[in-house]
Image: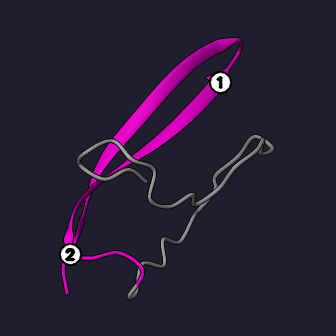
Amino acid sequence: MYDAAGREVARIADGTREAGVHTFAVGVSGALPDGIYFGRMVVTMAGEREVLQARIAVVR
């Protein structure tokens, strides 16, 4: 996860996974202040690389 300034503030998962459906829990309780963050995932399928991004709002 990255903050609005582009700094990495958390790493949820790293490395290679087997093909299939995967779920990753983001535990930010107390770790990050309220705000907008960005998640980034790199997927490679059949030699094609795709970067997926999501906006994540932390609100308490």
- Please tell me how crowded label 1 is: few (under 14), some (14-19), or many (20+) other residues with Cα within 10 Å: few
Query: Residue at 47% across / 27% down in the picture?
Result: 51
Between 48 and 27, the one nearer to me in the picture: 27
Q: How many labels does the image show?
A: 2
Q: Is mark 2 on a helix, strand or loop?
A: loop
Q: Kindly identify the amino acid type of the residue bearing the numbered disc 1.
A: Thr
Which of the image's four quarters has the C terminus?
Answer: bottom left
Residue 30 falls left or right of residue 43:
left
Earlier sequence position, callout 1 versus callout 2: 2
Which of the image's four quarters has the N terminus?
Answer: bottom left
Image location of residue 49, percent across then percent down: 59, 17
Image location of residue 10, percent across then percent down: 50, 61
Please state the extent of the stretch shown in magenta in the rendering: 31-60
Residue 52 on the magenta segment = yes
Q: Disc 1 to disc 2, how far (Cα)?
A: 32 Å
Q: Mark number for residue 10?
A: none
Q: Kindly identify the amino acid type of the residue bearing the numbered disc 2.
A: Asp
Query: Residue at 71% across / 15% down in the picture?
Result: 46
Residue 51 falls left or right of residue 56:
right
Q: Mark number for residue 34?
A: 2
Image location of residue 52, percent across then percent down: 42, 34
Q: Is residue 50 above or below residue 59?
A: above
Between 21 and 28, the one nearer to me in the picture: 28
Q: Is residue 1 above or below residue 40?
A: below
Between 58 and 19, the one nearer to me in the picture: 58
Q: Is mark 1 on a helix, strand or loop?
A: strand
Query: Residue at 48% across / 79% down in the picture?
Result: 27
List the residue tagged with mark 1: 44
Residue 42 on the magenta segment = yes
- Please tell me how crowded label 2 is: few (under 14), some (14-19), or many (20+) other residues with Cα within 10 Å: few
Q: In this view, does 49 lie above or below 57?
A: above
Query: Residue at 56% across / 32% down in the picture?
Result: 42
